[in-house]
Image (cartoon, grey):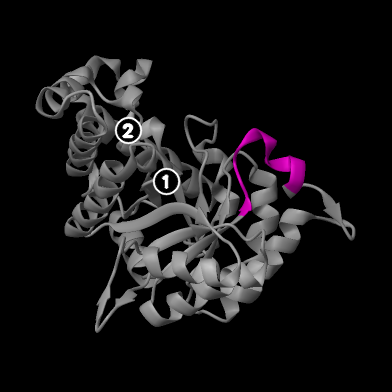
Amino acid sequence: MIQKLIQKIEKTHAPVCVGLDPMLGYIPEHLKEAAFAEHGETLEGAAEAVWQFNKAIVDAVYDLIPAVKPQIAMYEQFGLPGLSVFRRTVDYCHEKDLVVIGDVKRGDIGSTSAAYAAGHLGKVQVGQKEYAAFDEDFATVNPYLGTDGVKPFLDVCREEKKGIFVLVKTSNPSSGEFQDRIADGRPLYEWVGEKVAEWAESCMGDSYSYVGAVVGATYPQMGKALRSLMPKSYILVPGYGAQGGKGADLVHFFNEDGLGAVVNSSRGIIAAYKQEQYEKFGGDHFADASRAAVCDMIADIGGALERAK
């Protein structure tokens, strides 16, 4: 699957990922009103509004981008109806030939991680049959439990030719409370990055590994150091746009081949119509605002990479 991601990035000239992280506050009133009219102000009604919102955005941007990243918590909050829409969204994005990165941040003791890996990337055995429960192409993984928690994902990646992005340096403001702590003379995130590089070597595709890393756009200098530590790992870069990351901050996340990173924007894209820059579209044309925001993001990142050559 890492090869498909690379090929789609090269085809679209857009190392961009759209985060499908819907909150009810992002969804225009007309979509919520229609969903509530059909299902009432219920979990089912909320899930239906999320589905219609997602579908419209995917329809508007799928030809521009290689990948999407649905964040599972935004669906879990609506219970079983929300999880049903999560799977429905994954399937719909696959129909549009998009690579799906499940932002699930799983990681636990070995047996539990094995179940997470099977549920999100692999297959689960039920009697004589096998089923892909959620069937994402990549999943985000929390490495806090060490190799015990990551190895089951590596096993599934090898078997299914899918991938993971391991949390190394996250974009949130308090990430440094633990990730920046000095251990044996170096920040913890560097030790994690070295371990990711080791895992990556054991799980290679053609030129890049199935094992990638999450490094926030809000920490460009740390990204530069981590890029050199993990030369064969793709970096998923959250924090663009709404969290403050800009194209000029991102050049060090890429390798000299112009590859090696995919940059995510979530609310900066899906809630673009609420921003002053795109408010002219209004709620009725929210998906058109998302498309315009994607185009601007691609131009910003592409221009920064071109200037850095």
Horizontal arrangement in the rendering, residue 28 relative to residue 9 (left or right):
left
User: Could you tell which of marks 1 and 2 lies nearer the N-terminus?
Assistant: 2
Judging depth in this view, the residue of 193 and 117 nearest the camera is 117
Residue 226 percent across, percent down from the top left: 67, 58
* The label number, if any, that marks residue 270 in the structure image: 2
Name which residue lies at 58% across and 72% down. Answer: 110
Mark 1 and mark 2 residues within 8 Å of each other at the beta carbon: no
The mark tally for this picture is: 2
Q: Quadrant of the N terminus?
A: bottom left
Residue at 24 percent across and 84 percent down: it is 128
Tag 1: residue type?
A: Gly
Up-down: is 264 above or below 9?
above
**Rendering quarter of residue 276:** top left
**Which residues are drawn in magenta?**
168-178
The reply to whether residue 126 is visible in this rendering is yes
Mark 1 and mark 2: Cα distance apart in space: 21 Å
